[in-house]
Each structure stands twice: as structure tokens, then as C-alpha cells.
Image (spheres, grey):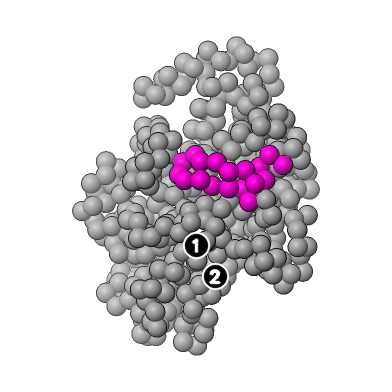
């Protein structure tokens, strides 16, 4: 509370210098409703905190930052319409956000058509900065390949020669994660390691029931759930009722604090996954700026920040940094300022890789802690135990692998 009052006071002191300056508008394109609503909320809160802090310190190039927000409803067409409206009617200089990769990819193309940068937050499909990548798309989060590379190494060491069963959301992100997981874990044989795909975005409870019954009948040792948000919640609840955790190791490639909170520590215990960031990471690794963010966010909102909040917060600060290094909001100049830029903010060093605009960063293989340990946290959110850390350069696709993916898709071998 004291910190928020101090920020408000600082904002008043700087308002006189900013009042004559036209606001610099940025757009947040995210789901305000639906199964990924919590992930969207976390993005909004993280972004608001960054904007509040930046305005309290004088804005960007002396201009106050104003955020325009729109609801994608997890619909690519809606996402595109939002981008067009925010640029045409509000003159936003940059747009960011997203949970669905299909929405982010479509929205990013719309931003490029109007010469604006689009920063993807939670868009994990390889295509976002891969086969569908372009000059105006930057992704702050890791991607399916990086996730699978980290988890695949761990599974290959601890679950070699085991039988896997995949339950995959039937859309671009699901396909991308499954393909990458199979490649990295050596489970390409779909007869030995079968899959059931569940509808997206309108899966029903019986869809997950049928998929989990098929998994149980397969006698698999490892169950990989490539699901998110409310779909993951329903699937794990059913798996719990079927006692599947006692029969197989559950792997959840893209973990989410919000989903973990919905399920609770008893159901989450022992599940293995990956994460680009989680709130206790800065404390364990001694990342002071990350600790400042966690404490500011927790004090402001009475909850711990998720990786979605951290991503949105980081994007706003990285945009500020790029604009100020470029000395302008001109899109071409900001792109040049971002490409190849290395920085440390909430964790160890990250890089906006020049050839694909993928943010290359460390990936953490994690396991969900026992209930008693989770509840030791003030906000009952201490879920994450680090099993392994994979450096970004080791986890990410190489230039040659990226170009091969572009070649297969019929895309140019450089960003256009």
C-alpha cells in the first residue's frame, strides 16, 4: 500500500512535465473471458503495473503511457479486428498479448499490415516466430520447441523406454507442442505412443473422460497433457477421480500458476512440466529486479504473479527500453533496437534473437511440490520446484533448424 501511494505521488510530481506531451498509446489484445480468462487477467495486471511505474518515472521519451485494452475472446477474427481498431482509431504504437497462438499469429499479421510491432506473450506454437514469423512479430515467451527440448532431456534421462500417451488440444499450439515433445523425447512412434485429440475451444467433459479412459487402457507409463486453462482443470480432476496419478507420471508441458491454483496443491503434487519463469525463481537465484517485481505485484494485487504477468510486464519495459535507445517510436527503428538486444530484467540474461525475433532464455524443468510446502507461502502459491535448468541457446532451435521449418512451410528463409 505504501509503495502504491509513493508511486501515485511520484506520478503527480511528473504529471506537470508530461501534461504537454501527447500520450504514447500501446494496445493489449487478450482474453477477458473464457477458459483462459485468468491468464488474460494476469497479463493485464502485469502490464498495468509496468505502465504505472513507467509513468511515475516520467513516461517514455517524456510521454505518458496510455494502455488500450481489447478482448480477443480467443477468436482470431476478433483479435484481428481489435488490432485494426486500436491502430486506426486510437493510434497505438505497439500491440501485445495473447494466449491462443492462432489469435496471436493472426493479430501479428494484422499489426504488420499497419506497420506496428506485435509482441506475443503466451503464444507457444513454434509457428509464431517460426513458419509464420515476420519482421513485426516478437515473442517474449518461450516456444513449444524450447519447452520440449528441456522436458525431453529430463524425460529421456528418467523415463527412457517407457510408454507414453498424449492428450492434445486440437489446434495449432497443441500440434506444435506434441510434435516437439515427440521429437525431443524419442516418442515419434504413434502406435507405441498414441494420442487422443480433444476439441478446442469447445471441448466437453465427456471428451476428456473418453481421452483419459483411452490413456488408462493403453497401460502407458507417462501421460502427457497438452492442455491449458479450464481444459487442464477438467482433465486433471477426472484423472484424479480415476486414480491415474497412481498409475502413470503426468507431464504438463506448459505449466501455469493460475491453473495450478484452480486445481489446488493436492491434485497438482508430483506433476512435471516446464516454465520460463515463476514467482519464487528470483528468490532462489538472487535476481533482485525480479524480487522487486514479485513484491510490487503481490502488494498491489494480493496474489503472486504468474509467468503471464511477468511476460506482459517485461514486454512493456522492453518496449520502453527499445524506444529510448532508438530515440523514436518509429517502428523500423524500434525493430532494429530490439534485434539482437541482450538484457536481464526478471531473471538471467535474455536475448531478442535477430533472425527469428524469438526471445531466447533459460527454460526450467519443474515439479509441483507437496501440499504442505505449497501452503507455506502467504498466498498458497509455492508450487514450483526446480528439477533442471536448460540454457536458452541449448533449448532453442538453431538457425538451420528454423530455416528448415520455414522451407517446409514454403516461407522465405529470412523474416519478411
Q: Which label's residue is closer to the chain start, 2 or 1? A: 1
Q: In which quarter of the image is the C terminus?
A: bottom right
Location of residue 16 with respect to 352 vertically, above or below:
above
Which residue: 63% across, 51% down? 353
Report if residue 110 lies within the magenta region.
no
Q: In which quarter of the image is the N terminus?
A: top left
Graded by Cα atoms within 10 Å as few (under 14), some (14 to 19) or many (20 or more), the crowding at tag 1 reads many
Between 6 and 274, the residue placed more toward the observer is 274
Q: Where is residue 19 in the image (x, y as percent from the top left)?
A: 64, 15
Look at mark 1 in the image and give the residue it sits on.
147
Q: Which residue is drawn at 27% across and 41% down?
A: 378
The residue labelled by disc 2 is 180
Residue 217 found in image quarter: bottom left
Q: Is residue 134 left or right of residue 312?
A: right
- Determine the residue positioned at 66% across, 42% down: 338
In the picture as drawn, the residue positioned furthest to the left comes out as 372
Q: Of 9 and 151, which appears nearest the observer?
A: 151
Which secondary structure, mark 2? helix
Which segment did they paint magenta?
336-353
Rendered location of residue 178, percent (x, y): 53, 71
Distance, label 2 to label 1, CA atoms, is 8 Å
Give yes or no for contact between labels 2 and 1 (Cβ–Cβ under 8 Å). yes
In the rendered image, is residue 18 in sight?
A: yes
| Above or below 227: residue 160 | below
Q: Between residue 275 and residue 198, name the one nearer to us.
A: 275
Q: Per the image, is 345 magenta? A: yes
Residue 114 x/y as whole percent: 78, 44
Amino acid at each position: 500500500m505504501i509503495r502504491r501511494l509513493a508511486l501515485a505521488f511520484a506520478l503527480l510530481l511528473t504529471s506537470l512535465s508530461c501534461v504537454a506531451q501527447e500520450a504514447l498509446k500501446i494496445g493489449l489484445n487478450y482474453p477477458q473471458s473464457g477458459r483462459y480468462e485468468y491468464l488474460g487477467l494476469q497479463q493485464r495486471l502485469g502490464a498495468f503495473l509496468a505502465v504505472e511505474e513507467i509513468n511515475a518515472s516520467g513516461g517514455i521519451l517524456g510521454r505518458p503511457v496510455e494502455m488500450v485494452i481489447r478482448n480477443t475472446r480467443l477468436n482470431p477474427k476478433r483479435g484481428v479486428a481489435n488490432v485494426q481498431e486500436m491502430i486506426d482509431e486510437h493510434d497505438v504504437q505497439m500491440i501485445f498479448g495473447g494466449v491462443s497462438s492462432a489469435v496471436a499469429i493472426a493479430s501479428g499479421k494484422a499489426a504488420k499490415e499497419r506497420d506496428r510491432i506485435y509482441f506475443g506473450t503466451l503464444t507457444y506454437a513454434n509457428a509464431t516466430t517460426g513458419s509464420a514469423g515476420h519482421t513485426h512479430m516478437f515473442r517474449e515467451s518461450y516456444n513449444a520447441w524450447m519447452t520440449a527440448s528441456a522436458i525431453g532431456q529430463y524425460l529421456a534421462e528418467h523415463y527412457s523406454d517407457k510408454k507414453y500417451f498424449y492428450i492434445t488440444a486440437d489446434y495449432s499450439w497443441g500440434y506444435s507442442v506434441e510434435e516437439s515433445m515427440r521429437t525431443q523425447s524419442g516418442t515419434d512412434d504413434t502406435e507405441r505412443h498414441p494420442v487422443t485429440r480433444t476439441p478446442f475451444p469447445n471441448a466437453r467433459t465427456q471428451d476428456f473422460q473418453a481421452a483419459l479412459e483411452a490413456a488408462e487402457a493403453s497401460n502407458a507409463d507417462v501421460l502427457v497433457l497438452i492442455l491449458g486453462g479450464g481444459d487442464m482443470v477438467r482433465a486433471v480432476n477426472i484423472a484424479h477421480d480415476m486414480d491415474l496419478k497412481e498409475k502413470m507420471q503426468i507431464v504438463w508441458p506448459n505449466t501455469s500458476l493460475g491453473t495450478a491454483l484452480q486445481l489446488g496443491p493436492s491434485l497438482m503434487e508430483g506433476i512435471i512440466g516446464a516454465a520460463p519463469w515463476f514467482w519464487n525463481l528470483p528468490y532462489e537465484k538472487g535476481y533482485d529486479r525480479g524480487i522487486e517485481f514479485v513484491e510490487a505485484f503481490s502488494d498491489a494485487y494480493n496474489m503472486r504473479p504468474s509467468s503471464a504477468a511477468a511476460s506482459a510486464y517485461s514486454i512493456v519495459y522492453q518496449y520502453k527500453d527499445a524506444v529510448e535507445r532508438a530515440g523514436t517510436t518509429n517502428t523500423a527503428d524500434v525493430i532494429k533496437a530490439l534485434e539482437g538486444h541482450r538484457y536481464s530484467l526478471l531473471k538471467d540474461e535474455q536475448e531478442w534473437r535477430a533472425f527469428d525475433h524469438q526471445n531466447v532464455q533459460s527454460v526450467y524443468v519443474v515439479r509441483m511440490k507437496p501440499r504442505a510446502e505449497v501452503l507455506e507461502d502467504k498466498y498458497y502459491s509455492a508450487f514450483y520446484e526446480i528439477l533442471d535448468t536448460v540454457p536458452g541457446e541449448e533449448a532453442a532451435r538453431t538457425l538451420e533448424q528454423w530455416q528448415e521449418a520455414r522451407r517446409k512451410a514454403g516461407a522465405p528463409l529470412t523474416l519478411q
